[in-house]
Amino acid sequence: NAGVTQTPKFQVLKTGQSMTLQCAQDMNHNSMYWYRQDPGMGLRLIYYSASEGTTDKGEVPNGYNVSRLNKREFSLRLESAAPSQTSVYFCATDSGRIAYNEQFFGPGTRLTVL
Amino acid sequence: AQSVTQPDIHITVSEGASLELRCNYSYGATPYLFWYVQSPGQGLQLLLKYFSGDTLVQGIKGFEAEFKRSQSSFNLRKPSVHWSDAAEYFCCLNTNAGKSTFGDGTTLTVKP
């Protein structure tokens, strides 16, 4: 089992370009999440999907859109990239947004916006 | 609103020495607490979690953590650090609704 996979691993964009980050899980989990990680700031939630067909904003949703394509896949789109979106992006999953559930993380996508 | 504070940004210990990483939280109800580890270039991996019962919890790789409600703390410990423990460590609090709040992380360097 691959667990949680993310593509691409690295990406460099110019300001104003668009791209989609892909995430897939084979854990049969209901909930999926997108975080960004910036130095000294921990992980901040961008969007999450509690179940197939639903998505909700997290702490820092501006400049991003998401699609829960099916139970396995959850993509994050940057329509017009800005240098402030330079970050490491992590996808995570859990079996449900319940207090005692731990999250399982992908390896991350390192994005640089010039 | 809930919050998690990891007071130490960076800690350096010698291999074989003991380790304690601090985590303090603020939350008005019973917290669900986690420690995750992130090795360079990798995603986060769960070390241990606490949500009820014994306040001393054991995790993987020889780590343990103690929940102290009176001090709002959940400190991570290991009696003897190995070079492979060098990584970034994150404390995380889940609310009753399942919302996760992560601390800013503590980077551990292990000296030979």
Image (cartoon, helix red, strand yellow):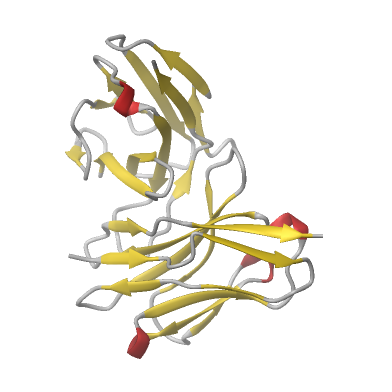
> Which image quarter holds the N terminus of chain B?
bottom left
Q: Is residue A78 left or right of residue B84?
A: left
Q: From the top left corner, tell me how far across and down residue A93 is, in percent.
A: 40, 44
Q: Residue furthest bottom?
A: B70
Q: From the top left corner, tell me how far across and down residue A68 is, in percent.
A: 28, 29
Residue at 53% x, 24% y is A9
Q: Nearer the viewer, residue B40 or B60?
A: B40
Please tell me whether residue A84 is drawn above or below residue B66 in the rendered image: above
Residue at 36% x, 86% y is B71
| Number of numbered tags placed on the structure image | 0
Q: Is residue B78 left or right of residue B3?
A: right
**Quarter-of-image position of residue A63:** top left
Q: Nearer the viewer, residue B75 or B100?
A: B75
> Which image quarter holds the C terminus of chain B?
bottom right
Please tell me whether residue B2 is drawn above or below residue A89 in the rendered image: below
Q: Nearer the viewer, residue B52 or A84?
A: A84
Q: From the top left corner, tell me how far across and down residue A49 is, in percent.
A: 26, 39
Residue at 25% x, 27% y is A66
Q: From the top left corner, tell me how far across and down residue A82 is, in percent.
A: 28, 20
Q: Nearer the viewer, residue A55 or A111?
A: A111
